[in-house]
Amino acid sequence: MLPTGIFSQSMIAGLAMAACIAILGLGTPTAALADDDHGHPANPWTAESAIQALKEGNERVVNGSPTHPNSTLELKKKLAAEGQFPLAIVLSCSDSRAPVENIFDLGFGDIFSVRVAGAVPGVDELGSIEYAVDHLGVPVIMVLAHTQCGAVTAAVGGGEVPGNLGALLKQLSPIAKLVEQLPEDKRVEAAIATSSIYFRDHLTQLSPVIDEAVKTNHVKIISGVYDISTGVVHFDD
Ligand SMILES: [Zn+2]
């Protein structure tokens, strides 16, 4: 006779696993394991082709000739049936003036988007990035700041902010500190330009998973600043 306690525990574990797979869009457990020698899925994009797609897409937008690709019902059905292989993970701000797919003239299945005020890589954001690196084989992480960012402006302004927003803004305090010697009217712009580079350079310190993926050439981290007025993405070198 089966020990009912253990049996029900394994049932719960199975249900939990099925729920995780469904939520994360893995399809089947083996889908996540179909990969190269290092445990990263075989995403058809390379870092080079992905960065080129981002740059060309933004150029189309800036030139006034976006093609609004990858938005058909047929593609949605294909992505649902076969799974996703996004070309880039973009960590960017929640600001409504900076919608990522529109910025790069891309569509469904193209961007693994992680959006949070100030584009700060907190625990949840890092976990999301780690998932896309390890389970979707995404070859590029882009940290994308934007002009006139309210979160960065608030962090530079200093002062106590109550609640969870205060906790979020604290993650921008190292950047505010880096610009505090500048003239007051230059600080926000400098902090925004600094934030994308600062977070780009700190992702590997914040996440051993990302660090390992960078060291084994499975992912490349880039950064830039989006100008909400002109639509131009300035890619950092
Ligand atoms: Zn912002």
Image (cartoon, grey):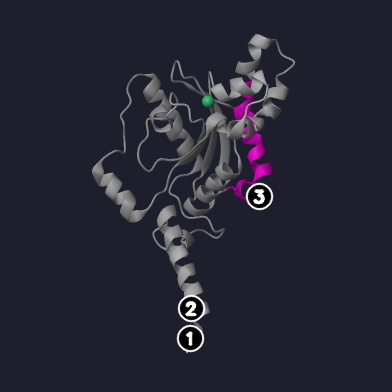
* Circle 1: element type: loop
Q: Quadrant of the C terminus?
A: top right
Q: Which residue is mark 2?
A: 7
Q: Between residues 234 and 73, which one lies in front from this camera angle?
A: 73
Residue at 28 percent across and 45 percent down: it is 75
Q: CA distance from mark 2 to mark 3?
A: 36 Å
Q: Which residue is mark 1?
A: 2
Q: Do the residues bearing badges 2 and 3 touch, measured as CB atoms within 8 Å?
A: no
Between disc 1 and disc 2, whose residue precedes?
1
Between disc 2 and disc 3, whose residue precedes?
2
Report the magenta stretch's main SS. Answer: helix
Q: Which residue is mark 3?
A: 208
Q: Is residue 216 magenta?
A: yes
Residue 55's x, y, as percent? 45, 29
Whether 73 is drawn above or below 159: the answer is below
- Mark 1, other Cα within 10 Å: few <14 / some 14–19 / many ≥20: few
Name the amino acid type tagged 3.
Pro
